[in-house]
Image: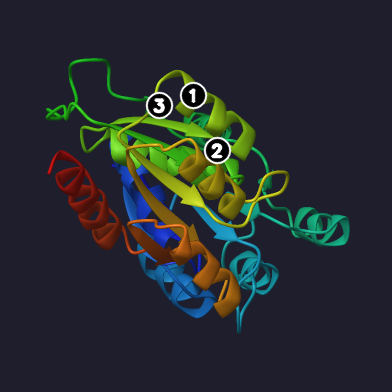
Amino acid sequence: MINLLIVDDDQMNCDLLQSVFTRQGYHVITATSGREGLRLFRTSDPRVTLLDLRMPEMDGLTVLKEIRAIAPHAPVIILGGGATEIQENQARALRATDFIRRGLSLDVLVEVVNRITQQSVQPAIASSPPGNGPYIEQIDESVLVVDDEPLVCDLLVQFLSLRGYRALGVKNGHDALQIVGDTPPDAILLDMIMPGIPGIEVLRALREKEYPGGIIIMTGSQNEELLEKAWDLGPQEILMKPVDLDRLLTAIQLVLVCREC
């Protein structure tokens, strides 16, 4: 089994990526700091490393420099959400194998990882053929994920799908409101800070439309005034980012149970 190392200070991203790539057949190791990532790189000898660019204390570029001193040709894919052109050029100068910009989807990341492993090992790791994976109990309830970060949106959709929910993702408030108008989901997982129509305005519109399902807000904002406005609009839960996935699943289950009541 091929070792894949994920280094990202966001625990939710680590957990979601681990879920996705374990499903792809990889042995996934995660670290939430640059120092821990370097220790695991030395001990686990990963075939591919996914490395977040923006981390506190030791950022991705510093980690990449250390990796190059250990293994000059080791495949390292930079997750460069919010990166500047200068930072991207610095990563490429350090021979980053690939640079995944903000806005690219999960499918792109999976394709890049699979392509790299196919070049370095035979037979190639590939997705399990339909019907050969573990049995997933289907839940007859739908969850709409609304998040402007494509990678996070895709990861959450796949995470919920693997747990049996009928999950759908959109990247903006306009599309979310259109879907709710056509086929209302049982629950909505809504990012509060988005360009275009912010999540709080989506929430207000849902209340005006008397949307009957459950609404869970996700946010990294600590703005007390904004959070108070959100609570006034009656979501069932507000989860702070990075979201704990066990707590997220519990919140969704409670929302759906209360909806039935």
Residue depicted at x 61% and y 79% = 58
The spot of residue 37 in percent (x, y) is 47, 70
Residue depicted at x 65% and y 63% = 53
Q: Is residue 242 visible?
A: no
How many residues crowd around disc 1 within 10 Å: few (fewer than 14), some, or many (20 or more)? Answer: few
Q: Tell me if 172 is positioned left or right of 5 in this view.
A: right
Residue depicted at x 59% and y 70% = 226
Identify the residue position indicated by label 1 in the image.
181
The spot of residue 67 in percent (x, y) is 59, 67
Looking at the rendered image, the quarter that the C terminus falls into is: top left
The vertical placement of 147 against 56, above or below, is above
Give the mark toward the camera: 2 or 3: 2
Q: What kind of residue is marked 3?
A: Ala
N-terminal of the pair, mark 2 or mark 3, is: 2
Q: Residue furthest top?
A: 130
Q: Quadrant of residue 65?
A: bottom right
Q: Tell me the SS state at disc 3.
A: loop
Q: Is residue 56 visible?
A: yes
Looking at the rendered image, the quarter that the N terminus falls into is: top left
Give the mark toward the camera: 2 or 1: 1
Pick the residue in front: 150 or 63.
Answer: 150
Identify the residue position indicated by label 3 in the image.
124
Q: What kind of residue is marked 2?
A: Leu
Q: Give the number of callouts.
A: 3
Identify the residue position indicated by label 2 in the image.
109
Q: What kind of residue is marked 1?
A: Gly
Marks 1,3: beta carbons within 8 A: no
